[in-house]
Amino acid sequence: MWPLLAMPAAFVLMGRYLDTISYGQAILTSGHWSIGFLCAALLATPLKRLLPRVKATQLLLSHRRAIGVASFAFAFIHTAIYLDKKWPAGLVLKEGQDPSLLTGWIAFLLFLPLAVTSNNISVRKLGRSWKTLHRIVYLAAGLGFAHWALTSLKPATALYISIAICLFELSRIRGKL
């Protein structure tokens, strides 16, 4: 699964290194892959409950953690490309105060402990606390969608997808009541 998840990253990173894709295209592509993988990870359980006989939903569910880590990896690439272009720190700190970028920075910081603890050792050591910690993903996702909407030329797309994810998640919560 990892080679499949890494292929788009190779495209983005090699494109920037070889200067065959622009800064804007690299930022856009890495951000879209990050949010796309995040959506896939968030939808794994609701889709499995909605379509229990579809084998693809079981495959998605069984690789949910890897997909979530891939989402973080693309967020990391997205951030690294931004920092490479915008450094020095003064400019980054100045731009980071804008709500459109601040939402992205906070989302990234919330994703960091999730990525670090997305391994079997952490799951065992944290026990039940692991699941509680990983519920932060919902806040991080909300901030990620806000970042996308606030920085996008087409914010409606971010809004529609975030509403769809919320509806799926509400159906998941409703199923537990």
Image (cartoon, rainbow, N blue to C red):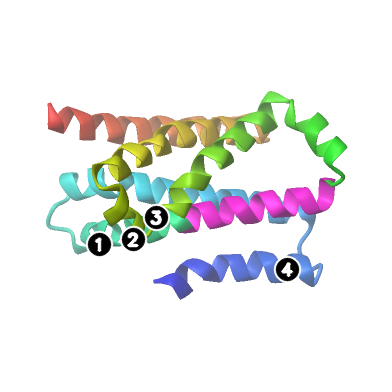
- Front residue of 4 and 129: 129
Q: Can the viewer see residue 24?
A: no
Considering every residue shown, the one lying at the far bottom of the view is 3
Disc 4 or 3, which lies upstream in sequence? Answer: 4
Q: Give SS at disc 3.
A: loop
Q: Mark 4 points at which residue?
A: 15
Q: Which amino acid does label 2 sit on?
A: Ile
The residue shown at (79%, 33%) is 93
The quadrant of the image that shows the N terminus is bottom left
Residues in magenta?
70-86
Q: Which of marks 4 and 3 is in front?
A: 3
- Front residue of 124 and 61: 124
Q: Which mark is residue 121?
A: 2
Q: Name the residue under label 1.
A: 56
Q: What residue type is labelled 4?
A: Gly
The quadrant of the image that shows the C terminus is top left
Alpha carbons under labels 4 and 2: distance apart = 35 Å
Crowd band around label 3 with a 10 angstrom C-alpha radius: few (<14), some (14–19), many (20+): some
Q: Are marks 4 and 2 in contact (CB under 8 Å)?
A: no
